[in-house]
Amino acid sequence: MDSLAPEAVEPLLTGRFGRPYVYRESCESTQLLLDPSLPEGAAAVAEEQTAGRGRLGRVWEATAGTSVLCSVLLRPPTERRFAELSLVAGIAAAEAVEGATELAAQIKWPNDVMLNRRKVAGILAEAREDVVVVGIGINVNQTRIELPPSPHTPAASLRTIDGRVHERAPLLAELLARLERAYDGWRHGGLDELYAGLGARDFLRGRRVSVDGTSGTAVQIDREGRLEIDAGGEHVLAESGDVAYER
Ligand code: BT5
């Protein structure tokens, strides 16, 4: 098994993100390891989580040593919409996944990264006062039976998609570098700045969707990070929520 210990990852870091680097073999959730007083870009990484978190009280399951499980502390400017950070991190995770697999990844609004129509990564952004902890879980080396059964959005790992075992340390370093770049762009110009990379990877566009009671055809993720839905001619903007979609 490869390792995400500091000696494997720190030499590969190229920017501010990932410093300091907080590492645990096992923890409840990497979301709980970052004290708000740490500098922006501080990252927490673990081989295993005993209570990995999804959104809305759901769980994130990952066999020890198979995944990238990472949280990053951000201190976004107050004029930005914090909800957009899931998409900012989604772009970074999609780019990192594409770098590792040479396949095109997509972003399923509001917080999933898809490869071959399967979820390979999930994002969780949690705000506490003026800091936001962004958690990113990427399924890297799980075998098919190690992946959780998910009734709605099928799960995959990079390995189940391309048949290769991937080294996680370079993937994590790439993720942190991409996140820093996307985040700096967003700080400067909002989602507009990143829109080319977002619009081109919009998984739901053109699909039949249902978001918290609104059903219709997904038109696009808009420049404020909302999902525009054509509900029988009436255009509705969903701010956040859970999407059911037709595969
Ligand atoms: C997410 O939630 O997709 C956010 C996942 C964030 C995980 C990272 S890991 C590092 C950091 N520390 C944490 O504790 N969390 C973050 P959501 O959209 O609610 O999706 C959760 C649902 O996806 C679950 O209810 C399962 O159905 C499914 N699921 C669980 N584990 C999965 C996996 N490894 N791959 C794909 N789907 C999974």
Image (cartoon, rainbow, N blue to C red):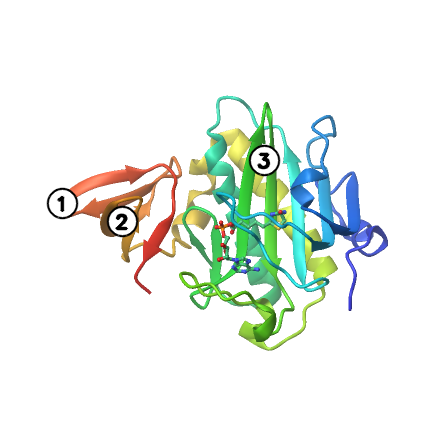
In which quadrant will I find the C terminus?
bottom left
The amino acid type, in three-letter code, at marker 1 is Gly
Q: Rounded to the nearest whole Å, what is the CA distance between mark 1 and mark 3? A: 37 Å
For label 2, the SS is strand
Nearer-the-camera pick, 10 or 29:
29
Q: For residue 184, which numbered disc appears in the image?
A: 3
Q: Rounded to the nearest whole Å, what is the CA distance between mark 1 and mark 2? A: 11 Å
Q: Nearer the viewer, mark 2 or mark 3?
A: 2
Q: Who's the residue at 49% across and 56% down the image? A: 113
Name the residue beneath numbered marker 2.
Answer: 219
Residue 15 visible, this angle: no
Q: How many marks?
A: 3
Name the residue beneath numbered marker 1.
Answer: 233
Q: Position of residue 39 (x, y in %)?
A: 73, 30
The answer to whether residue 122 is left or right of residue 202 is right
In which quadrant will I find the N terminus?
bottom right
Residue 39's place in the image compared with 9, above or below, is above
Q: Position of residue 107 (x, y in %)?
A: 45, 53
